[in-house]
Amino acid sequence: MLKIAYNPSQKFPLSILFLPILLIIIGLLALFSISVNQFGVIAITAFTKQLLFMIPAIGGFLVILFIPKYIIHKYIYVAYGLILALVAVPFLLSTIAGTHRWINIGLPVAFQPSEFAKWIVVVSLARYLSDHNLEIKKFSTLIFPILIALFPATIILQQPDLGTALILLTPVFPMLYWVGSRPFHLFMILAPIFSIGTAFHTVSFTSWAIIMGIILYISRPNLIFGIVFYFVNIFLGLLAPLLWNGLRSYQQKRILTLFNPELDPLGAAYQTIQSKVAIGSGGFFGKGMGEGTQTHLKFLPVQESDFIVSVIGEEFGFITIAFMLVIFALFIMKIVNLAYHSNERFAGLVLIGIATIFLSHVFVNTAMSTGLIPVKGLPLPFISAGGSFLLSCFIMVSLIIKMGMETIE
Amino acid sequence: MLKSKNLVPRSRLLITYLFISLIFLILLIRFAQIQLFEYKQYKKRADINSIRALPVSAPRGLILDRNGHILVDNFPTYILTASPNKVNHNNFSIISSCTGIDTSSLKSNFKRYYRGRFIPSRITKDLSFDELSCIEEHKHELRGINYSQLSERFFPANVDMSHVLGYVKEVDRSLLQNINSDLEYNVGDLIGWQGIEKQYEHLLKGEKGILYSQVDAFGREAGTVKGIENIKPLPGEDLFTTIDLGLQKYMEKLMSKFKGVSLITDPLSGQILSFVSSPDFSPEIFTGNTTLHEWRNLVNDPRKPLLNRITNGLYPPGSTFKMITAIALLEGLMIEEDEVIECSGIYQYGDRLFKCWKIRGHGKVNLDQAIAQSCNIFFYQAVQRISMNRFINLCRNFGFGIKTGIDLPTELTGLLPTRDYMNKRYTSRGWSRGHLLNMALGQGDLLVTPIQLSVYINKIATSGETFIPHFDLNKTPEPVSKIILKNQTWAKIQNYLFNTANSINGTGIAANPKINGLKVYGKTGTAQNPHGDDHAWFTGYAEKDEKMVSIVLLIENGGSGGKIAAPLASDAFEYIFYNNRDRIVNNVENSI
């Protein structure tokens, strides 16, 4: 079948499929373990659901595989317009689980359009950035690509879904870097965000101030510009806590809730602690499948999706975690490698964007589960339960194969 | 554009690789830190810091009588549970020595309630205080064994009426798969399984709560958990029934000698005041520790105590059915009031002989006398003026052959033999109008339930304006299906029933307690029964000062309705109306 659709002289980088399949197996094992002790409606467990979700995921994978690359390139802006409309649709519908993330499609499972926005934004950016006439070294050139990602991200932020909104924004910078923007320009855009973000923690802020100084020294911009830039950032950082304290508590709460919809002061910390205890008590070899007392007794509310790593860590141990991380690393590097060897800028950019999406998912999810960063609900690719996300991941794998296809000659 | 060359310097690839490696290195170090270097610390915490979520069952709503007397109450008992992941099989022998229950039944309970490795499974219930303290003494040896409270149903009112109250059943694993309900159940929960308990399950059930507690490695509670709110159980709602406890007890006592039925309702509201299906059994048989032997006795008792005779007993109605013929005749203007028919005690139809119960015959009787004296010959002849379809339709309008809609989970429709039914059963040549003659007397293939007969007499008592019989006191009564007859017809029928219970020759005279101002109406029946002696029927109603009650009495194999059933009705009326005892009915008025 594949041979009909494609020129047999072209080689697929199909070997890359091997890595996601390993990840899926790890995920299914963890879900199976959770489901063993789930009682209630018999036969409908996280595990069986995930197995069922494979069907649409593989379907999506094949559909994308059979669409020629030039068609994707040609119509991606149309898809972009559609997805903008789709992420706005849930606002017109009643909320599911208190948010506007999902669209009820008359099936037992709801559909989450923002999942698809991730790769549509990446492909749109790739098309925009692969234009010959782009003066990539100019700072002003950076504005429009950022807007491409920022626009849907802003809508999704209102759903509210900060995690997905951030994921939408992250590919912009690696893609700009890949296409040849000046790293210092990217630094200029990101610096104020870091300045404000680190401002609430003295050590972080001091380190940041030092790093910023070093970077400015190395990059050697115009002296006056460099000094002004540095102090504006420091000033922003110093001002942030003052501004924050000047807010009334309900206003603070409103902002915090925007950034963390599940926020509940005791609850968030509690989840992190429980997750760490679960992972830590797993040790090197883990407690064995179905034996995780923390997993099965505890109240990690989303242990089948956002906190799946706690289950794996507790029951399958550090050895499996390390194995999983290595596979993720190999997978992402392999994508970058394909991007490097690609002879088309468009394909290379799509690959870099997808690699970023996977990388940020893995980082945010595992860092959150181990208490490195605040609790932020993002699933782990191929492993967490969830239909829309699985479909989205499969589509991205399909895109990887498609974009990597002609690079091997 | 698609073909834009991709010229990426190698340094960029290396920097990207470096960045990715760095990220994964951080993650790997973090996991190693938690899982390898801080392993002991977390392991300890995992062991001692476990949180238990105990479901707290919501107390079921009580069932009360119309005056607030409790019919069904809750009674707390202690149950013992074992956590499968911690329990040691030696534990069972310790528990066995404390409670005197053998280990094999403890183990079989353990299996029966098993819900998963980390969920405590129930091993025994109804622990006494001594047994509890014995277990508490051995606490250090009994890891994973805990006790908790559970409510059971108990019945303080000392009435039987188990057919009405029904019972609750514990949900076990096999049952869980067969429950078809939008309410949520877990193993060990109680579910209403019969009677009112089942019918009003949604009201009585309540919602479970969750109690979070911190427990240490030995399963001992170490206080509440910070940051998680316990969820309080929501008790079930109490159900006030229309039953009058005093009357119920009185009627149960009256009926205790007999096999049969006594059903007292208020025709003006459809409320059921007393409901006796005798022989009855104590509802307590379903709680506590009923032995298999006791249970077998109940199931195999030839008197069938488990049968709810009022909704599920099928009987020929006998002469109580004669009003149908009378109404059909009056409605169709097919009879003059002073028209007389000669009863010689015997009547020949075709090649069959039909007899009157009075062997010498009633002589010349009109419709009024024919009902009052329950003359069969009169009806054998008069019914021939009515078409079969007309007769059957009228029966159906009075509620025969269809369910009454009483608020109990099960009810039979009885058997109203239509033309189609007769053709199927006897072939179209195999039956004749002779069968209709039998049906006019409430015999033949016709079978009714006592609750249908109650709706029938209530319709007559209220000229068709009665309500569906029900137990829920707070329910707005639902009118029965409409039946439209001439006012005159109603008045005449009511008058005939009055004469039956008041004239010297009336067969129902024994049902009249002769209380000042009390008007008694009724009809007796003596139904032939192929399986034994005749069934004695009385169905009627009494009114005083615009208060009304109706009664349906059946004594299986009791013989003559007038002699056996009617006097019991008199006792009931006397209890209700004599000496200000009519407070029951007063109460009816107030509650409407």
Image (cartoon, rainbow, N blue to C red):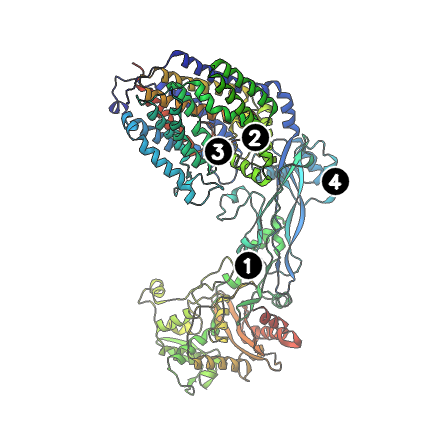
Residues at circles 1 and 4 in contact by the CB criterion of under 8 Å:
no
Query: Would you name the residue on which mark 1 appears?
Result: B304
Query: Would you name the residue on which mark 4 appears?
Result: B133
- Give the chain letter at badge 2: A
Please state which of residues B117 and A88 is positioned toward the viewer in this rendering: A88
Please state which of residues B532 and A246 is positioned toward the viewer in this rendering: A246
Q: Which mark is residue A162?
A: 3
Q: Which mark is residue B491?
A: none
Q: Position of residue A408 (x, y in %)?
A: 31, 15
Query: Would you name the residue on which mark 2 appears?
Result: A240
Q: Nearer the viewer, mark 3 or mark 4?
A: 3
Residues at circles 3 and 2 in contact by the CB criterion of under 8 Å:
no
Q: Residues within 10 Å of mark 4 (few under 14, many from 20)?
A: few
Q: Are marks 1 and 4 on the same chain?
A: yes
Question: Secondary structure beneath disc 1?
Answer: loop
Q: CA distance from mark 4 to mark 2?
A: 62 Å
Numbered-mark total: 4
What's the residue type where badge 3 is placed?
A: Leu
What's the residue type where badge 4 is placed?
A: Ser
Q: CA distance from mark 3 to mark 4?
A: 55 Å
Q: Are marks 3 and 1 on the same chain?
A: no
Q: Residues within 10 Å of mark 3 (few under 14, many from 20)?
A: many
The quarter in which the N terminus of chain B is drawn is top left
Q: Nearer the viewer, mark 3 or mark 1?
A: 3
User: Can residue A69 be spotted in the picture?
Assistant: yes
Question: Secondary structure beneath disc 2?
Answer: helix
Q: Nearer the viewer, mark 1 or mark 4?
A: 4
Q: CA distance from mark 3 to mark 1?
A: 68 Å
Q: Nearer the viewer, mark 2 or mark 1?
A: 2
Q: Residue at x 53, y 56 (%)?
A: B199
Question: Secondary structure beneath disc 4?
Answer: helix
Q: CA distance from mark 1 to mark 4?
A: 43 Å
